Amino acid sequence: MKENEEGQLSYRLLLAVDIQGYSRRDTREQLHAQRLLSEALDGAARGVGLDRAGWDKQVGGDGELATLPEGVDPATVAGDFVILLDGALREANRDAGRFRLRVRLSLHHGTLTAGPFGPAGDAPIVVQRLLDAAPLRRLLADDADRDLAYVVSDSLFDDVVRTGFCALPPRGFRAVRVAAKGAVFRGHILTGRAAGEDAGGPGARSARVLDFPALALG
């Protein structure tokens, strides 16, 4: 997204991703984790007909904030892309060595505008606050076999996941409320598995529901 002098708003799908435990790795291990994550994201995107080269990315050492192009099907990204990413992470971790690649992922759609240091507006804030949410971090901390912790915003859950067009079923998510920086952010965390037995497909087990007593919605 190129900076617009008139500050024009656009309504876009945003994706934020972060590597869990990145700072505990040495420099070589950090570089390896970056490469593995980039390859996993590339592969998942290609699998649903997308090209990450066309994403507007604000990159940090342990992850990125990406604004996806106009016209991208949000149901495909919220479902099929996430399933493929989970599978790619599982494959990457077959020979993980000292550190497995464990990732947090958040999705939101909303308004933003381009700025000199990245997108500005409510949408980038929402997707980042959900990415940093304590329940999402706890999901990885409490489940050693999990490679991906995934959350969608409240509005994206209502507009996309609940429609039935998303490959991940609504019953696999748990609502959470996160207080940060004097504001409240609502989202839905996938408590089942994106890929594999808990994905919600035929023959799948019921999604594992974790208890977030301080932050869960009733």
Image (cartoon, rainbow, N blue to C red):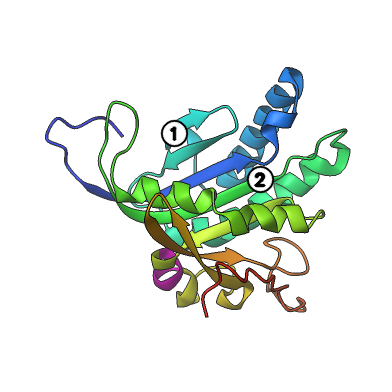
Query: Which residue occupies 71% across, 64% down?
Result: 193
Residue 56 shown in magenta = no
Instruction: In the rendered view, tell whether residue 200 sits above or below residue 25.
Output: below
User: Which stretch did the figure color magenta?
Assistant: 156-160
x, y percentage for residue 108? 42, 55
Query: Which residue occupies 55% across, 75% down?
Result: 170
Q: Residues within 10 Å of mark 2 (few under 14, many from 20)?
A: many
Disc 1 on helix, strand or loop?
strand
Kindly check if marks 2 and 1 are in contact, taking CB atoms under 8 A apart as contact: no
Tell me if I can see residue 48 in this picture: no
State the residue position of label 2. Answer: 103
Describe residue 121's horizontal placement relative to residue 34 as left or right: left
Instruction: In the rendered view, tell whether residue 43 sits above or below residue 214.
Output: above
Q: Label 2 is placed on what type of residue?
A: Val
Please name whichever residue, 32 or 72, is drawn nearer the observer in this view of the structure. 32
Residue 57 is tagged as: 1
Q: Main secondary structure of the magenta part?
A: helix
